[in-house]
Image (cartoon, rainbow, N blue to C red):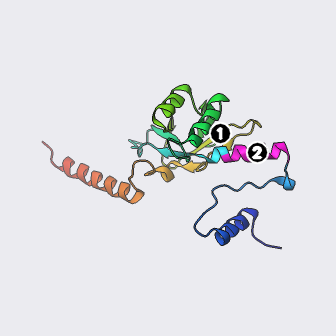
């Protein structure tokens, strides 16, 4: 008997048969479940894992005050494809919701996963993005975004839950080392400017 977990075993098998591929989602069905409920769970997990979140821009904190940041939910399906249109059409028609919160004790908010304006924009441009403004106290804040399921159980989207700091540089093209270097440069500049008192 293998000491590997089911997920580890699946990843190892994937590496063996498809060395250039990776598994993004592993669904372990209890009792080998092949009933409608189990298949609905698999479908909901796959739908949720098709979505991911990026940070619009790195947050700037002042005097430890909370700030509002824009999280952008995107889809892994390629833009301008029938698959994306079909996927978002399903979210739109069933009025699927995204439930999100920052940190475990925070109030959970919800929005339509594909509201009319986002659906209309996707049909026009072929692209999907949904903006979620959230208030955070620090980059250590943890955000969780879940897609509701028809079973009544939400599934976290693929890179959630995650720390805000893990999202820095995901959308802006600025990597964490670049962001730290820029921050250090700005701090040095502020110090230099402060020394030039007029």
Judging depth in this view, the residue of 154 and 45 nearest the camera is: 45
Residue 115's disc number:
none
Q: Residue at 33% of width from left, 53% of height from top? A: 183
In this orientation, does residue 190 appear? yes
Label 2, label 1: how far apart the Cα atoms are: 12 Å
- In the image, 9 versus 36, the foreground residue is 36
Prevailing secondary structure class for the magenta stretch in the rendered image: helix
Look at the image and tell me in which quarter the N terminus lies.
bottom right
Residue 60 position within the rendered picture, expressed as x and y whole percent measured from the top left:
39, 43
Q: What numbered label is drawn on residue 147?
A: 1
Q: Residue placed at 75% from the left, 69% from the top?
A: 4
Q: Is residue 73 left or right of residue 99?
A: left
Dot 1: element: strand
Vertical order, 19 against 29 (above or below) = below
Q: Position of residue 126 (x, y in %)?
A: 49, 37
Residue 66 shown left or right of residue 113 in the figure: left
Residue located beneath label 2 in the image: 41
Q: Which residues are magenta?
A: 35-46
Q: Look at 58% across and 50% down and name the residue there.
A: 159
Crowding around mark 1 (Cα neighbors within 10 Å: few <14, some 14 to 19, many 20+) is: many
Question: Could you tell me which secondary element the residue under label 2 belongs to?
Answer: helix
45 magenta-colored: yes
x and y percentages locating residue 145 in the rendered image: 60, 41
Specify the farthest residue to the top. Answer: 116
Q: Give the percent coordinates (x, y) of residue 115.
A: 56, 28
Residue 108 visible? The answer is no
198 lies above or below 189: above
Question: Which residue occupies the foreground of this view, 57 or 48?
Answer: 48
Which residue is nearer to you in this view: 19 or 172? 19
Residue 42 shown in magenta: yes
């Amino acid at each position: 008997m293998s000491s590997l977990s089911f997920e580890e075993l699946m990843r190892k098998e994937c590496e063996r048969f498809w060395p250039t591929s990776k598994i993004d989602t592993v669904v372990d069905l209890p009792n080998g479940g092949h009933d409608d409920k189990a298949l609905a769970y698999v479908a909901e997990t796959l739908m949720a894992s098709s979505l991911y979140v990026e940070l619009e821009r790195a947050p700037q904190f002042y005097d430890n005050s909370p700030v509002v940041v824009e999280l952008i939910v995107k889809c892994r399906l390629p833009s301008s494809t029938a698959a994306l249109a079909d996927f978002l059409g399903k979210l739109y028609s069933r009025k699927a919701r995204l439930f999100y919160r920052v940190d475990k004790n925070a109030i959970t908010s919800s929005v339509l996963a594909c509201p009319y304006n986002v659906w209309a924009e996707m049909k026009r441009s072929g692209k999907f993005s949904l903006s979620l403004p959230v208030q955070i106290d620090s980059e250590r804040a943890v955000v969780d975004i879940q897609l509701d399921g028809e079973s009544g159980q939400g599934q976290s989207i693929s890179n959630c839950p995650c720390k805000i700091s893990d999202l820095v540089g995901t959308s802006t093209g600025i990597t964490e080392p670049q962001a730290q270097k820029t921050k250090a440069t700005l701090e040095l500049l502020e110090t230099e400017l402060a020394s030039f008192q007029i």
